[in-house]
């Protein structure tokens, strides 16, 4: 699957705002012409979601993520290990190059048309179960992440520490 | 007369005070900094909101309080404001957004208020919103915030 992590629960409630809210370039406020996704197998969904939230130092949240498989070509853009603490999501990172705003809006339109079939939900409880299991197995990446000075307390709570 | 006390690099991603400013300079610096940042980014975006939160938080409060940005960006402004600024005026601006007509913006307000759940009035406002918000997405965001 081509996993796109949703930013907002409510973005699909306002069809006009969906594209602008979910595919916004953080540095310009315009539409992002390099859409970030993870090319993964279905069983890695929860792991990838948890790693994305942790690596971006976000508070852990569930989301109804999206599978963009078959909608566009992707370019592999692995994230450097010195900047990204998790190997699975780092190596799975790809980008969908779009030539114009119209391309992005077209992609968003196709997504909305097949939203039900493309939704890949991950609940916070799923994340907690995954992280606790990883910690229980002394996973080196999660152990290192949770030992960082800047890790949010919510991650330690999620991990049961 | 205020001297120029700010330098910024060519990528405009950071700013540095080159000496400790006087009180007058501080006031002028904050106003000037907001103008500089607004000019650099030429539009509302997450990077601008992050920069304002660091260098000119009062300006970010005003953007949120007055709802100056489009809804698809105001939602991020609210989240970033709450993450970085804890002033009563910032929290009040976020609380007011819980009644915004756009669910996208209300979700941003919930995310912005989440770091302030140690305040009784914030917790109470979020609990009240659970029972009355018509949006399933906002109610999910509220449930997640209140369970954290």
Image (tube, rainbow, N blue to C red):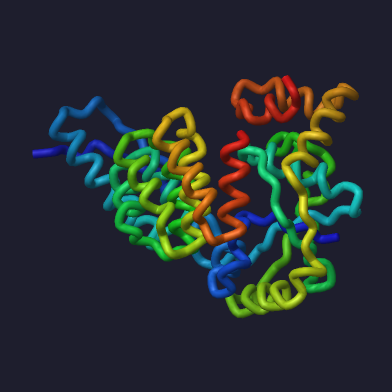
What residue is rendered at 79% in x and 45% in y? Answer: A48
Question: How far from the left and from the top, in percent, is residue A78?
Answer: 78, 49
Is B10 on the left-hand or right-hand side of A118?
left
Q: Between A95 and B75, which is closer to the camera in this rendering?
A: B75
Tell me which residue sits at (49%, 49%) in the image: B129
Could you say where residue A53 lies in the image, as x and y percent from the top left? 68, 42
Can residue B11 be seen in this snapshot? no
Q: Nearer the viewer, residue A65 or B54?
A: A65
**Horizontal placement of B6 versus A120: left or right?**
left
Q: In this view, does B90 lie to the left or right of A125?
A: left
Is residue B118 visible from the viewing direction of this image? Answer: yes
Report the quarter where the C terminus of chain A lies. top right
Q: Residue lying furthest left in this view? A: B1
Instruction: Determine the residue positioned at 39% across, 47% down.
Output: B94
For the view shown, which residue lies furthest in the front direction? B131
Q: Quadrant of the N terminus of chain A?
A: bottom right
């Amino acid at each position: 699957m081509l996993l796109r992590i949703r930013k907002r629960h409510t973005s699909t409630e306002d069809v006009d705002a969906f594209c602008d809210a979910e595919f916004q370039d953080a540095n310009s406020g315009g539409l992002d012409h390099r859409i970030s996704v993870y090319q993964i197998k279905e069983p890695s969904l929860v792991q990838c979601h948890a790693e994305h939230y942790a690596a971006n130092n976000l508070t852990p949240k569930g989301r109804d993520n999206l599978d963009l498989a078959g909608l566009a070509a992707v370019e592999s853009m692995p994230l450097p290990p010195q900047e990204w603490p998790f190997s699975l999501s780092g190596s799975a990172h790809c980008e969908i190059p779009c030539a114009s705003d119209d391309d992005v809006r077209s992609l968003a339109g196709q997504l909305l048309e097949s939203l039900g079939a493309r939704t890949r939900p991950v609940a916070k409880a799923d994340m907690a179960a995954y992280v606790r299991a990883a910690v229980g197995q002394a996973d080196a990446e999660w152990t290192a992440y949770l030992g960082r000075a800047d890790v949010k307390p919510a991650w330690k709570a999620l991990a049961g520490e | 007369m205020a001297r120029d006390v700010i330098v910024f690099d060519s990528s405009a991603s950071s700013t540095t005070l080159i000496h400790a400013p006087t009180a007058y300079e501080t006031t002028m610096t904050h106003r000037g900094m907001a103008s500089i940042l607004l000019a650099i980014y030429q539009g509302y975006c997450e990077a601008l909101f992050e920069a304002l939160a660091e260098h000119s938080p009062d300006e970010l409060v005003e953007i949120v309080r007055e709802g100056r940005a489009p809804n698809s960006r105001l939602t991020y402004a609210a989240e970033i404001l709450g993450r970085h600024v804890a002033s009563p005026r910032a929290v009040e601006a976020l609380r007011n957004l819980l009644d915004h007509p756009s669910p996208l913006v209300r979700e941003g307000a919930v995310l912005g208020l989440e770091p302030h759940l140690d305040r009784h009035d914030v917790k109470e406002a979020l609990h009240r919103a659970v029972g009355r918000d018509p949006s399933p997405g906002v109610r999910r965001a509220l449930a997640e915030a209140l369970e954290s």
